[in-house]
Image (cartoon, rainbow, N blue to C red):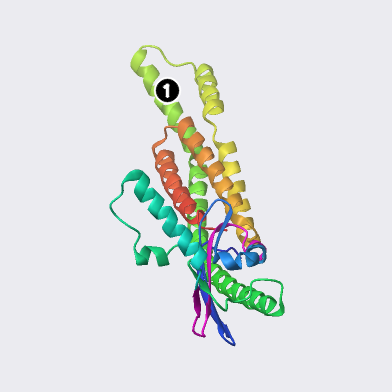
Amino acid sequence: MISSMTGYGTVSLRKQDTVVYIEARTVNHRFLDPHIRLAREYSFMEPGIAQLVRSAIRRGRVDLCVTIQATLPVECLINLNTTRSYLEAAARLQDEFHLADSITLNTLLGLPGVLQNQNPLPADGATAGSELRELVLSGVRQALETVLEMRRTEGRALEAEMRGYLQGIRDKVAAVRACVPAVLEEYRQRLEERLKYLLPQVAPDPQRLAQEVALLAEKTDISEEITRLESHLDQYAAVLDDGSEAGKKLDFLLQEMHREVSTVLSKTGHLEVTRLGIALKADIEKLREQVQNVE
């Protein structure tokens, strides 16, 4: 079964006085591109979270946000030394550059280190810190599983739609193959008519005419391209059946199909083959749009 690269999942966990909220979102990308948002004081958890993401998802952009909150009221302390340093630096800048504005209370409170939590959540190797890490990692696992389930559900819808396009392409390729004898016969008739127009008094040499038709048949033969197209279609179906890391394989096969159809169109100007070739290109482009979101 193939998977889409679009998914979303949220998890909220609570243990004692700590609440952990996880939000995970994935979209299509050529490679695995994880982005983890986590408060700086909890950055020690990031390697473990990144490992979980890599083990669960093979391809796509992953935005994962981890929010950790304490339910108890936060007791803040003012770091007087840090505050004094900020004010002194601001005063020096005012004197040096003759600035009129002075630092406000709101600005001061927003500066790093001015306010400190008296009882921060532990961010070290202590028992409480280890428990917090396990709570966060558990939440990440659950959020990623929700994302994966959504990706699998959308993948099933994508696969059904692609198989429909695939069958349409097969039918058109079979129709192109059926046109091959008509292409040669049409050219033979056109060549005879041209010769009669240019040389109305001279009957065309049947042997020379056969040679010319045979020469064109060699130049305009599209049997090999049709055979390769049919092979690509079989491989495409096999990749859908397998489902593992299908996106890049399917995209490559579609590029090859597009190339074969372009070669068919360049080799023959037969009206029906041209019509079918244009329709084939349209179906291949529709498949390529779907494949862009396959993992």
Q: Nearer the viewer, residue 35 or 90?
A: 90
Quadrant location of the C terminus in the rendered image: bottom right
Nearest the eye: 167 or 242: 242
Q: Residue 96 at x, y = what percent?
A: 37, 44
Residue 210, image x, y percentages: 53, 22
Q: Is residue 99 left or right of residue 60?
A: left
Horizontal side of 137 relative to 272 (left or right) equals right
Asked where in the image residue 86 lies, by quadrant, the reply is: bottom left
Q: Is 66 or 287 nearer to us in this picture?
A: 66
Could you tell me which residue is drawn at 36 percent across and 11 percent down?
Answer: 201
Q: Amino acid at mark 1?
A: Leu
Vertical side of 205 occupied by 225: above or below:
below
Whether residue 96 appears in this view of the structure is yes
The residues colored magenta run 52-77
Where disc 1 sits, the SS reads helix
**Residue at x 62%, y 59% (from the top left corner):** 58
- Residue 280 magenta-highlighted: no
Q: Nearer the viewer, residue 253 or 57?
A: 57
Q: Name the residue carrying label 1.
A: 191
Residue that lies at the very extreme toward the bottom in this rendered image: 16
